[in-house]
Structures are given as C-alpha cells and as structure tokens.
Image: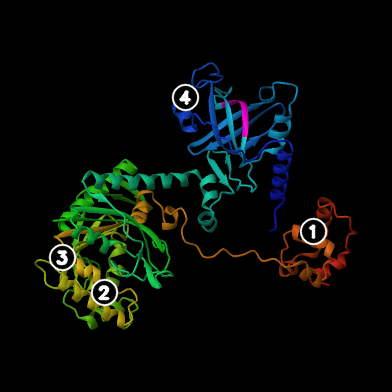
Amino acid sequence: MQLSEQEINRRQKREELMRMGIDPYPAALFDVNTTVADIRTAFHTIEPEQDLSGDKRWGHVQLAGRLMIIRVSGSASFAELQDSTGRIQVYFRRDDICPGEDKTLYNTVFKKLLDIGDIIGVRGHIFSTKTGELSVYVKEFTILNKSLRPLPVVKEVVNEQGEKETYDAFTDPEQRYRQRYVDLIVNPQVRDVFVKRTKLVNSIRQYLSNKGYLEVETPILQPIHGGATARPFSTHHNSLDMTLYMRIANELYLKRLIVGGYDGVFEFAKDFRNEGMDRTHNPEFTQVEFYVAYKDYVWMMDTIEEMVEKVALDVAGTTKVTVGENVIDFKRPWKRLTMFEAIQEYTGVDVSEMDEAALRQVAESRGIKTDSTMGKSKLIDELFGDACEPNLIQPTFITDYPVEMSPLTKKHRSKPGLVERFEAICNGKEIANAYSELNDPLDQRERFEEQLRLAERGDEEAMALDEDFLRALEYGMPPTAGVGLGIDRLTMIMTNQPSIQDVLFFPQMRPEKKLEQSSESDFVAAGVPAEWVPAVQKLGFMTVEQLRTANPNKLFNDLGGVRKKLKLEVKMPALDEVKNWTGNS
C-alpha cells in the first residue's frame, strides 16, 4: 500500500504515543456528560469573559469529539471540537494541562502528536473569551482515537463583503457516496438529511401504529418473486439446492396475513430490483407497504393524503416544502385525475379505446422506442411516463388504470376494462402505488397466466405465478386496500435532495478503480535506476506512462528536493539521464 507523507507521519506519531505509554486506542469508557448542542442551548447568549468554573453543572463538563481545527501557539492554544451535535471552541493552557514540572503532555503530546481528525475527550468548564466566543476551558484531555488518514480540509474565509466563502469542500459525489463516513464528518448538513429521514420513518410508524395496525416482518429471500413487475436478483440456497429470489415487493406475504385474520398490517421493507440506476433508482431501496381489511382504494387515497401531510409537518414543520425551484404543498386535498384523463390532458390524444397497434403508433410518434415484448399495459405506462409524470409537480393521484397494467388489482366497479388503482405522483415521480386488492382467486389466476404469456414474449419484468398465494386467496381474503410508499423518494422531496444517492447512507456504486502502479522493475526497464524509483513515485509518477508525460526539466529540479527529503545517499542524475527516463532524449 502506497502511503502519503501525512499517512506515514501519523503512523509515526502513533508509535511515539505508544512508546510514551499512551494508548492511542484506549478500552476504558469516557463518561460524556454533555454535548455541544446542550452547551449552545444553555448559553444561547453569553457575555464576554464569563467564567463558569464554580457552576454546579457547567463547571464540570466532560465532552468528547473530533478535532477539526488546531491553532497552536506558545503556552496556550485553541482548537475546535466536533461531536455528533455540532462544534465548539476548546482552550488548552499548558500550566492547567500540566500543573507540575513535567510539561510533556502539552509540549509534546498536544502540540506535536495530535492532528486534525483525532478523537479526544476533554474535562473542564464553560467560559467565554474576550470576544464573547462560547468555549470549553480544558483542564484534562484524553486521546480516544489516533486518526491515521488526514481529513479533507474544508476552508472557510470571510470575503470583503462579509460573506463566508468555502474552499476545498468535499463535494465530489463519487467520493461522498463511496466514503460516506468522511462526508458525514466534514459536511455536517449531510447528517441533518439522515436525521430527517429517521423522523420521516418514525412519523409514518407512529401514524400506522396509532391506527392499531400491526408492524410485521416477511421474508426477503423468496422462492417466487412477486408483488410487482420488476427483474429480481437471484441466489442459490446450498442446503435446499434451490434458487431463491431477493424480494422485489412484500405484497403477497402481507396479503397472506390479511387472509390469516389481521385487520391491518405494515412493514418497512428493504426491496431489491435488478434494474438500472439513476437519480431516482437504486437496486436496493426502502418502502413501507400496508394493507387494511374492509377498505378500498378511495379510502386509501384519503389515508395517504392524511399521513403524508402529517409527515411534512413532523419533518419540515410545514406542509409546504421547497424542492429545487418548486414549492410543493402537501396540504389536503390533493388533485385527482384518471390515467386516461392525464394522458389526454398532456398529449391531446384519447387512448382509452385504442388497441395495441394504435397505442404503439402513438408512442412511436412521440419518439418512444417500442419492441415486440411490449403489450398494451407497457405501452400505456411508457406514454404516461413520457408525457404526464414530469409535469406532475404538486401531489396528484392518478387513478383507474387499464386492467392489463395491474395484475393484482380488483376490476373497477363501474368502468369496464379498468382497475381500482392509484399512484401518488409528486415532483415528477411516483411516491406511492395502491389498489383495491384483487381477492377473487380465479380472476387472479387468469391475471397471472396473462403475465406468463408476457414473459414468453420476452418481458423480463412480468410476474411469476405463485400457487401458494392463490391457495391462500382460495381460503378467502376480505375486501382490502393496500399501498406501497417509497421512503427514499419521499425523503428526497422532504429534504430537497436531487438524487436518491443523497438520502441513502451507502448507495450502490460501481467497483472502485484500483490505483494503477508500475513495479520497480518496470521503472528500471524504462531507464530509472532502482535507487531513484522511490523519489519518482514520491513526486506522483506511479506508472511509467505517467512518467513519460513529465516535463524533464521540472522533474530534474524536483528530484533534488525529494532526494534531500528522503535522505537518499545517491548521486544526482544528469539532466540528459532524466530526459531519457521520460522518453525525451
């Protein structure tokens, strides 16, 4: 592993601490008795030069966190400590840290062996500086973790207009999503997104629990993938010697529980779909599904409105949420349109009576790519996604879908050819999908068989036929309303995040590219003497190809400095030799 100069330096400091008898990773607990947020709440305003050393509570604080700024001076120094709730200034004075003759703890440990990113515990009291800065006066400190990698240094300066400007921020999405732990350290606002996500989940859980519904768990590994139209991930169970699928939805299992006699069940489910990744799709995602007996999809629309309005109030404190350039209002009631009304409103075309050939023609006229695997349902879905969805910014219910699009949904009570289904669309994307659930086992079998025919035509997202689920329906499922609500997409809206990756701690990523590095023998073959290879690599030329791009004059000058830094006792090469290394001889 190629270590940077800072990484080497930190490892040396770790060894030095251990030689001094200081464990950089102690096992004993550090008894934290307050947080930065507690302190800032208690001292919302504070006068300059206040000293609370005699206060019963604030005269004896114990705080732990990560050093984010260190400003070392002579016998007194300042630093900034960051815990999970915020940052605060901490003050170290040599004679307080080391009251006796031995000043090693301050002069050596604090000033020379601590780095930004190290985690420490401090004991002391609250005070304010001459300028009124709320601070902790440190009487003792303990090293709790020696950080071996340097953090990205985010610099803030105040410009001539008095505005804060940030430099070198950790903003590259690839790095942020792959190293979320670093993102959370240096970008505190990111932590707030995930706090709000938890509030959102808790709000929904509280709403459903207060209704008397039972929170349950259903299998993630399933012998048959069902409950949605999607391509599954598959795996092999060695003991049973059978293929299992990671669930694409938990619908069919939750309905089995309604058959079993529960009036209402819900589950926060991790689901998995082996499909593309983009701004609103991740292969692993979270949704809450719930099913309530003796209800229908009209009741469920009212329920979703009420629940999501409550979520907005709990998370944002208002029903109005800013998302990009839009202000979305979740206040009830939401707009309601049938699917055919929506398509006609945004295309000017009435597709309600069209057959497959006519639908294909309309889709292709709008530039939608079609193929022979796409039946009526797929074509209508593509038309709606292309023409309508992007225009539905405010929360809107799209109702009454064609029967071909909804294999698990009860046929409409008054509109032949349609089913009792709705999708809630917001900010141009579906956030919820709900049905009056199909509970006729013979009708359900026919719908599954139609899905099998679509699969034979090549539709990889068609549903499989689940004989056990059909058996459950034959025992009798009461009239039921069911819904799936996407937690990730709703969180994106409630926290004004542009990508699903911003609301997942660890989104799926492509494999990390390994740093290419030529071997010593490769450099020697290119003309670099073996004793000079470490110096060449120190200058950042990790491959022979990179070395070939170097400016030989600059490389020659830089080698002198690196030779001194690495203490290489070798003769300097001639400029012509260096030109030969770079292929410029």
Q: Which residue is mark 4?
A: 45
Q: Which residues are magenta?
A: 136-142
**Marks 1 and 2, how far apart at CA:** 65 Å
Circle 3/circle 2 CB separation < 8 Å: no
Q: Main secondary structure of the magenta part?
A: strand
Q: Earlier in the sequence, mark 1 or mark 2?
A: 2
- The local secondary structure at tag 2 comes to loop
Q: Quadrant of the C terminus?
A: bottom right
**Marks 4 and 1, how far apart at CA:** 54 Å
Residue 123, above or below 311: above
Q: Which residue is mark 3?
A: 475
Residue 368, above or below 506: below
Q: Which residue is mark 2?
A: 465
In percent of width and height, residue 535 lies at 79, 58
- The local secondary structure at tag 3 comes to helix
Please state which of residues 364 and 4 is positioned toward the viewer in this rendering: 4
